[in-house]
């Protein structure tokens, strides 16, 4: 009864105008926010000559899928690079996030580039904290990635080539980087090396993995101004303060963990990259532990860099922090993986 007839109340014109102005301002603010922070500047797909195939498989009672890029020149047996997308991402989006750089490298040098799809856009990595479906359901993503490589063996797209099962590598961004680190910790028999961008090891109270204690070649590429995954360790934030991911170790501490596993006692080789683009607000440095008889461990620090993939030209959304144009991340990862096949090289 109290609300009866409310719709007959007179509405003052000034109130309508004020509401309309607020709506316009909100829309304009949204457009500005998108343009300033969320927009990814256009980057055209470079010409690649290989073929992209989609594959599906059931694993663990769940429908899963992946994309595989097959270059025209394919060694026999063929090495495999698993490229893992970030949280709320997709296999297709990871191609553009990496500026199709891995496909260009495969065209040049040979090898299969595989973009697996996380369960509902997420990977069940080593962080115990998380409320996404992959974490809640305890999805066996280590097993899934093993199944992906096994599924490729004998695939018609390979034109009779075999899979080099001892030349399987994994690279990932953010949640995908954490998944690559899970492979390093739990499946050293499966991967010949991993590279993680914008990711670190979880702290002890946030760790859900079984640590094998076996050394694996590891490359970390992290920005020390990352607004999501703190370079110096601490709480990880994803999509605002209501979607916590727990805490991670400092990037240097994570590198030290893998350095100790590999048995290095001396100081690393250190290198500073040329500042190829002073306007991007970043510079980059590198620490390397390398010897011919031990797995290589690298830490590339993007000073001033954010939660982004360094690339000579492509820039990621500004809200993620600065994108470095000083380091070609895909090229560095590719060289790192290649060095492991050669038994290591002088880092200088």
Image (cartoon, rainbow, N blue to C red):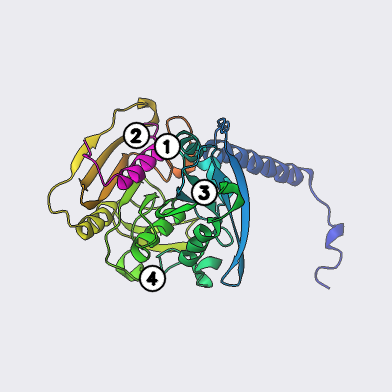
Identify the residue at horizontal 31%, vertical 47% (top origin): 340
Q: Per the image, is 11 magenta?
A: no
- The quadrant holding residue 3 is bottom right
- For discs 2 and 4, the disc positioned in front in the rendered view: 4
Measured Cα–Cα span from mark 1 to mark 2: 8 Å
Number of numbered callouts drawn: 4
Task: Report the Cα–Cα distance between label 3 and label 1.
Answer: 38 Å
Depth check, mark 3 against mark 1: the one in front is 3
Label 4: element kind: loop
Residue 230, position as x, y percentages in the image = 35, 52
The magenta-colored residue range is: 323-348
User: Are the residues flagged by discs 4 and 3 in contact, CB closer than 8 Å?
Assistant: no
Instruction: Please report whichever mark, 3 or 1, sits nearer to the chain's N-terminal start.
Output: 3
The reply to whether dot 3 and dot 1 touch (C-beta < 8 Å) is: no
Looking at the rendered image, the disc whose residue lies closer to the viewer, 3 or 2, is 3
Residue located 60% across and 48% down the image = 157
Q: Is residue 76 visible?
A: yes
Residue 344 among magenta residues? yes
SS at badge 3:
loop
Q: On residue 161, which mark appears? A: 3
Up the image or down, 84 lies above or below 96; here it is below
Disc assigned to residue 323: 1
Circle on res. 208: 4
Position of residue 136 relative to residue 302, above or below, is below
């Amino acid at each position: 009864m109290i609300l009866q007839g409310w719709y007959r109340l007179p509405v003052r014109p000034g109130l309508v105008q004020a509401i309309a102005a607020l709506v316009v301002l909100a829309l304009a603010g949204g457009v500005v926010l998108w343009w300033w922070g969320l927009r990814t500047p256009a980057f055209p797909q470079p010409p690649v000559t290989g073929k992209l195939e989609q594959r599906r498989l059931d694993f663990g009672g769940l429908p899963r899928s992946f994309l595989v890029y097959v270059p025209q020149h394919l060694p026999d047996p063929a090495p495999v690079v698993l490229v893992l997308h970030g949280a709320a991402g997709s296999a297709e989006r990871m191609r553009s996030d990496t500026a199709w750089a891995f496909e260009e490298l495969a065209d040049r040098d040979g090898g299969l580039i595989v973009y697996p799809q996380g369960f509902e856009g997420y990977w069940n990595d080593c962080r115990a904290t998380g409320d996404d479906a992959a974490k809640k359901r305890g999805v066996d993503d280590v097993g899934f990635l093993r199944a992906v490589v096994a599924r490729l063996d004998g695939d018609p797209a390979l034109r009779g080539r075999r899979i080099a099962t001892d030349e399987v590598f994994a690279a990932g961004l953010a949640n995908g980087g954490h998944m690559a680190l899970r492979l390093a910790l739990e499946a050293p028999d499966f991967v010949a090396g991993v590279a993680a961008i914008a990711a670190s090891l979880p702290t002890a109270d946030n760790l859900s993995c079984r640590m094998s204690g076996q050394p694996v070649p590891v490359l970390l590429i992290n920005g020390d101004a990352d607004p999501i995954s703190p370079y110096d360790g601490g709480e990880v934030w994803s999509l605002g303060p209501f979607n916590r991911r727990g805490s991670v170790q400092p990037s240097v501490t994570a590198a030290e963990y893998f350095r100790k596993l590999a048995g290095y006692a001396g100081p690393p080789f250190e290198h500073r990259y040329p500042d190829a683009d002073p306007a991007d607000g970043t510079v980059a440095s590198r620490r390397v532990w390398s010897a011919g008889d031990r797995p290589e461990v690298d830490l590339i620090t993007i000073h001033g860099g954010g939660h982004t993939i360094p690339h000579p030209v492509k820039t990621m959304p500004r809200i993620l922090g600065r994108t470095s144009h000083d380091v070609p991340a895909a090229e560095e990862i590719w060289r790192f993986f290649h060095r492991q096949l050669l038994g290591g090289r002088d880092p200088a």
